[in-house]
């Protein structure tokens, strides 16, 4: 990096000390913007880049709650309202013990460009807590969610900030959060949260959307080479919402997903993942991946190693940030992997991204390939605002059209800057220009 973008980056590092993931996410975007600023220096005027990397508002709050044994715990809650140029802040809530300000800031920053790519009029934000839902009873999760929402409620609203799920936050948590919001406000503001249940304002396809969209994006990338997913061996990491529905769509398109994982290890099932069993174990029983292997002859659990050791044609990282490093990328490439589409946010380290790009394989950054989740959240908001409900096929075809548009926007932007096939540059530039043009129109705010 050099010149104006380097100065902006150095200031971010200086002002956000120790927030490594945030630095990483900002660096990747700023590197892509260098040719844009050279071609259009006006994008660096009015401290636009300095404003872009500074959240509009950062909320950090105490979340006390009482466990089933009567012990009091104190968690930290976050909501980073990063950028509202394009619409109300929009982005998920993550409940995981690793959550801190730097992680929420990186996620909020990524969300700005992802949401811009969807072209649905949504700003960028993210939130969460260092609460760990694993092993907690429903009653404990409910009390935590109620305490969390008691503070969050004063900051959100259908035209202000619209949270949804992320790691550790699914339909159960959104239900408890919505119940408390409704009680505090004495208003049924369905559009204040997305990922709601289907009987109280949720949208069909929202559950499936992120995983489905990731696989549709991989399919679009392959189509540029005259290929498809048919018959391809696929490695998926994670065993949560995104991973499960990436596996489902990959199977529907004729591919063979053979792995999944959680923090206890990874599973290889050469016969192809038994999706009904995986859903039973993970969605119904909230179990561990070992519970799958115990009931599935031929599947094996590996606890010391990396899911990326398995030779495949396509890799779909769907667990968490920095889960795929330079060494894993080299192993994947040696095994013949030619397509990587990120379902998770920033799962590949910068070294892994560099390895994929120098090998010239098809590589999609999460802010493009996993945008189907937030896109379908915006479709949920649209249905809530119209007090209507679309059927599955209608919602899915809208999702498919949005993913196809995002793919084409990335391709067009990469071509425009003389970097055909560079989806990192394409996603960052296409997302940035949409936000930047509106920030300029709105003046210095
Ligand atoms: P879930 O909580 O449903 O599942 C997360 C999965 O990843 C679990 O299997 C979990 O294992 C594993 N995992 C999480 N953290 C770690 C870790 N530190 N080490 C090893 N494994 C880990 O979350 P989602 O599926 O919703 O989210 C997965 C990724 O997708 C995240 O990066 C998220 O930001 C991103 N994403 C999610 C969207 C959504 O709509 N839900 C939209 C766009 C992106 P374990 O249970 O053992 O922790
Ligand atoms: O990272 C993401 O895009 C999400 N967790 C989904 C956000 C949303 O508002 O649906």
Image: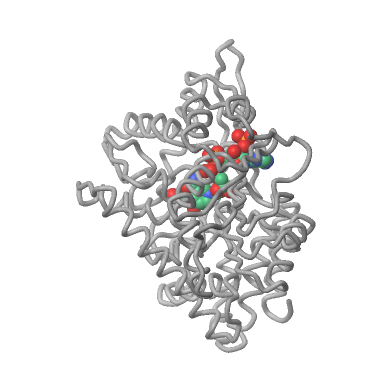
Is 265 on the left or on the right of 419, as rendered? right
How many marks can you see? 0
- Residue at x 57% of width, y 85% of height: 417
288 to 376, vertically: above or below: above
Front residue of 310/136: it is 310
Q: How is the image coloured?
A: one colour
Is 90 on the left or on the right of 34, as rendered? left
Please state the horizontal and vertical placement of residue 107, each as a whole percent of the image.
57, 53
Front residue of 166/121: it is 166
Front residue of 107/268: it is 268
- Residue at x 56% of width, y 57% of height: 232
Image quarter of residue 326 = bottom right
- Residue at x 20% of width, y 47% of height: 388
Q: Quadrant of the N terminus?
A: bottom right
Can residue 345 be seen in this snapshot?
yes
Front residue of 44/304: it is 304
- Residue at x 47% of width, y 49% of height: 251
Is 375 on the left or on the right of 310, as rendered? left
Is 353 on the left or on the right of 439, as rendered? right
């Amino acid at each position: 990096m050099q010149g104006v973008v380097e100065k902006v980056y150095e200031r971010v590092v200086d002002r956000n000390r120790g927030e490594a993931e945030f630095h990483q996410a900002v660096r990747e975007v700023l590197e892509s913007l260098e040719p844009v600023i050279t071609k259009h220096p006006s994008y660096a005027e009015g401290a636009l880049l300095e404003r872009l990397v500074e959240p509009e508002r950062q909320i950090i709050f105490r979340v006390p709650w009482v466990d089933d044994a009567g012990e009091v715990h104190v968690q930290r809650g976050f909501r980073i309202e990063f950028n509202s140029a394009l619409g109300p802040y929009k982005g998920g809530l993550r409940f995981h013990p690793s959550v801190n300000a730097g992680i929420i800031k990186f996620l909020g920053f990524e969300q700005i460009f992802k949401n811009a790519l969807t072209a649905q009029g949504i700003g960028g934000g993210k939130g969460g807590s260092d609460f760990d839902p694993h092993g907690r009873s429903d009653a404990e999760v409910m009390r935590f969610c109620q305490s969390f929402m008691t503070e969050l409620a004063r900051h959100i609203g259908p035209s202000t900030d619209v949270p949804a799920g992320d790691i550790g936050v699914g339909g159960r948590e959104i239900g408890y959060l919505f119940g408390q919001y409704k009680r505090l406000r004495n208003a049924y503001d369905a559009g204040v949260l997305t990922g709601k249940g289907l009987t109280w304002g949720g949208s069909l396809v929202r559950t499936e959307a992120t995983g489905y969209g990731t696989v549709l994006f991989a399919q679009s990338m392959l189509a540029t080479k005259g290929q498809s997913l048919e018959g391809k061996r696929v490695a998926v990491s994670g065993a949560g919402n995104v991973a499960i529905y990436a596996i489902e769509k990959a199977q529907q398109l004729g591919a063979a997903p053979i792995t999944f994982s959680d923090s206890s290890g990874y599973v290889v099932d050469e016969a192809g993942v038994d999706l009904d069993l995986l859903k039973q174990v993970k969605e119904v029983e909230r179990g561990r991946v070992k519970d799958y292997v115990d009931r599935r002859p031929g599947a094996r659990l590996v606890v010391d190693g990396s899911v990326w050791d398995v030779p495949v044609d396509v890799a779909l990282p769907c667990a968490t940030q920095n889960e795929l490093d330079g060494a894993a990328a080299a192993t994947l490439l040696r095994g013949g992997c030619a397509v990587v589409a990120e379902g998770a946010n920033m799962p590949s380290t910068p070294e892994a991204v560099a390895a994929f790009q120098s090998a010239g394989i098809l590589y999609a950054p999460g802010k493009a390939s996993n945008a189907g989740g937030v896109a379908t959240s915006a479709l949920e908001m649209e249905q809530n605002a119209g007090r209507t409900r679309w059927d599955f096929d209608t919602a899915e075809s809208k999702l498919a059209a949005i993913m196809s548009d995002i793919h084409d926007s990335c391709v067009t932007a990469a071509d425009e800057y003389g970097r055909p096939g560079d989806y990192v540059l394409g996603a960052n530039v296409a997302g940035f220009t949409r936000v930047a043009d509106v920030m300029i129109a709105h003046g210095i705010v």
